[in-house]
Amino acid sequence: MSFTLQWSAAFPSALFCRCSSRCSSKSFQRHCNRTLSEKVRVSDALSSKETGSNVRIQGWVRSVRPQKDNLFLHVNDGSSLQSLQVVASSHLNTRDLTFGCAVDITGTLEKSPSKRQNVELRARHIEVVGECNPVDFPFKIKERHSLEYVRQFPHLRCRTNAFSSLLRIRSEATTAIQSFFRDNGYVQIHTPVITSNDCEGAGELFQVEPAGHNDSDDPNPHFFSVPAYLTVSGQLHLEVMAGAFSAVYTFGPTFRAENSQSRRHLAEFYMVEAEIAFTESLDDLMKVMEGLFKAATEHVLSSCAEDVELFHKYIAPGHRAIDILKSSSQNFTISTEWGCDLQTEHEKFLVKHCGNVPVFVINYPYELKPFYARDNQDQPNHTVSSVHSGTPQY
């Protein structure tokens, strides 16, 4: 790839143009300001140790504080929880410069006298590229909104601190998960989203049919000639692939048509599934699960330190889950006995009992797990090699 830079005869062969003194056209001056300023993200500007550089930022205004001689803005572009303070002359203030508007700002990075951030942007030019009426905008300055209220505006909620932090953490966690499996020699498999398989056998499926299929006279109304569903798990596909690649994983959307709207039952979520061939013990699986959890957590903590407020780290001892539950003084809604499945209240208690850290519950009764779980052949309990992780809820 190559390019050729040609100079027009109408302009001298100079690298810089002092637009403020030589150019009468405001549009041309704005063009030169943009051209001669390096576009940076807010997160990069905040972490910059060099001052005096000409930069250009684009984002949304989080606050406006006009004063007699100066104008103070806080601008955020979603790359960081913290906003960049912009200081400008009061003559750059306009009626359109309001909370929530989109702006394009060029100026010089300077050392900030404030202890809250190292640098600030001394603006030379401010352009409002997207207006916002603060009266009609659903979110107000310095006002906390409940999650129930924010959910009413799915197209704008990503601008709130809570959702923007959540999405940044999710993005970094996804990166960490992919990197962990790649670095450990796993092959990623894209399992189908539409499938005829019911991997879990629970019957809680979303069935997929083409629009208008009920009006068709076709004796076989199914698009694929058989009923098709949104996937509940890619495990059966992974087990086949593990017979050729030894270690495989998938990370994608999963759908469950469960008749519940609790935080434990989601209609759609992203799930990590992995299969390993030639393994003889649950220890092999737990090492992978532990390694994945640690790698993802460490990456998120290092990459999103400002987005993550608090994490507790303990070393949890191993225990027998049913014995702990039966010997506790907690009044459970559903009593615990060997052979009965653990309920949400039981899992929460076990996590709290172990110090509010992630715990593994292993070796479930044979009758509680699907057919593909390995039989431990450990009479009289008769368990299968299955593991479930419980995590603290903050």
Image: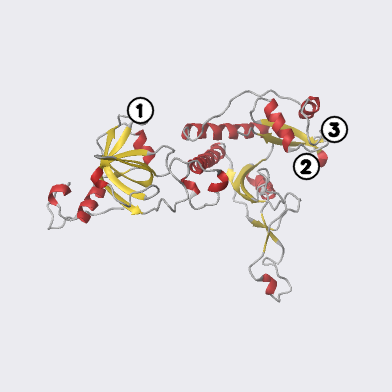
Q: Earlier in the sequence, mark 3 or mark 2?
A: 2
**Dot 1: what SS?**
loop
Q: Which residue is mark 2?
A: 369
Q: Residue 158: where, in percent of width, then height?
A: 49, 47
Mark 1 vs mark 2, CA separation in Å: 56 Å
Name the residue: 63% across, 23% down.
315
Name the residue: 71% across, 24% down.
318
Foreground disc of the pair 1, 2: 1
Mark 3 vs mark 1, CA separation in Å: 62 Å
**Residue type (three-letter) at the residue carrying disc 2:** Lys
Please tell me the numbered disc located at residue 115.
1
**Dot 2: what SS?**
loop
Question: Camera-side residue: 88 or 31?
Answer: 88
Mark 3 vs mark 2, CA separation in Å: 14 Å
Identify whether 151 is placed above or below 324.
below
Q: Earlier in the sequence, mark 3 or mark 1?
A: 1
Please tell me the numbered disc located at residue 381.
3
Q: Residue 48: where, in percent of width, then height?
A: 33, 34
Q: Residue 196: where, in percent of width, then height?
A: 70, 58
Please tell me the numbered disc located at residue 250.
none
Name the residue: 63% across, 55% down.
193
**Residue type (three-letter) at the residue carrying disc 3:** Asn
Q: Residue 134: where, in percent of width, then height?
A: 41, 50
